[in-house]
Image: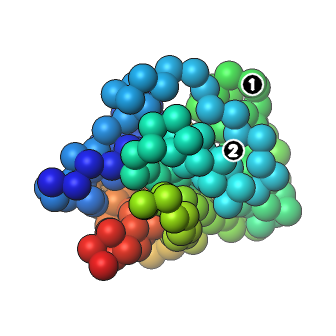
Amino acid sequence: MIKIVFATNNAHKLSEVRAVLGNGYELVTLKDVGITEDIPETGATLDENASLKARYVYERTGLDCFADDTGLEVEALDGAPGVHSARYATDSHDFKANNRKLLSELSGTDNRRARFRTVISLIRDGIEQQVEGTVEGRIATEESGCEGFGYDPLFIPDGYDVTFAEMSADEKNAISHRGRAVAKLVEILQK
Ligand code: IMP
């Protein structure tokens, strides 16, 4: 069993990543390794933030670890909220407020194209590598569904008529930004 730290305390992310990684890995969280403070996410890009988080954990634990950073990039908003997705409306990771703000910014806008992008930084034996996963779609005009988290009730992936929040965890994982990034992570880990 390969022990690896996933730099998160987000239970949704954890169960999504666990499902894709499969049984060969003992996935431990920040709390499990005694990191209880918020890791500063001061980077200007998803790549920088993923790297900052992974390095923070590696420097304190010396354990193999990975961190993800995700952004929702909306075409009509020039890529916003992007790296600011967590604190789009307020400073307090308020999903409901973020979704309200997104709907209000897009009100009257026909172009609702958007993509989720996840960057994962992996540090293994002290060496860092990054992988990325994306999913293209559009922003609905109202929230639907109660699965998942964050912007899921507003995001309709291409080829579907339902939001991520109306899909099962397995359905979302099979096509999502994070699912795709983790699949690439698994390829690296198995090398
Ligand atoms: P983080 O910095 O990677 O935690 O992600 C930033 C923000 O993007 C989160 O606070 C969520 O609002 C949103 N987000 C990340 N992943 C997802 C997802 O899979 N679905 C919906 N929203 C997400």
Q: Which mark is residue 35?
A: none
Q: Up-down: is 185 above or below 89?
A: below
Ligand 1 within 8 Å of disc 2? The answer is yes
Can residue 64 be spotted in the picture?
yes
Question: Residue 30 is drawn in which quadrant?
Answer: top left
Q: Position of residue 164 (x, y in %)?
A: 43, 53
Q: Position of residue 187 (x, y in %)?
A: 33, 76
Q: Which of the numbered marks, if any, corresponds to residue 91? A: 1
Circle 1 Cα neighbour tier, 10 Å, few/some/many (<14 / 14–19 / ≥20): few
| Depth check, front residue: 170 or 120 | 120
The answer to whether residue 157 of the structure is visible from this angle is: no
Tell me if mark 2 has few (under 14), some (14-19) or many (20+) residues whose alpha carbon lies within 10 angstroms of its own.
some
Q: Residue at x 37, y 74 (%)?
A: 188
Reading the image, the residue beneath label 2 is 85
Nearer to the camera, 124 or 154: 124
Q: Callout 2: helix, strand or loop?
A: loop
Determine whether label 1 and label 2 are within 8 Å by CB.
no
Q: Quadrant of residue 118?
A: bottom right
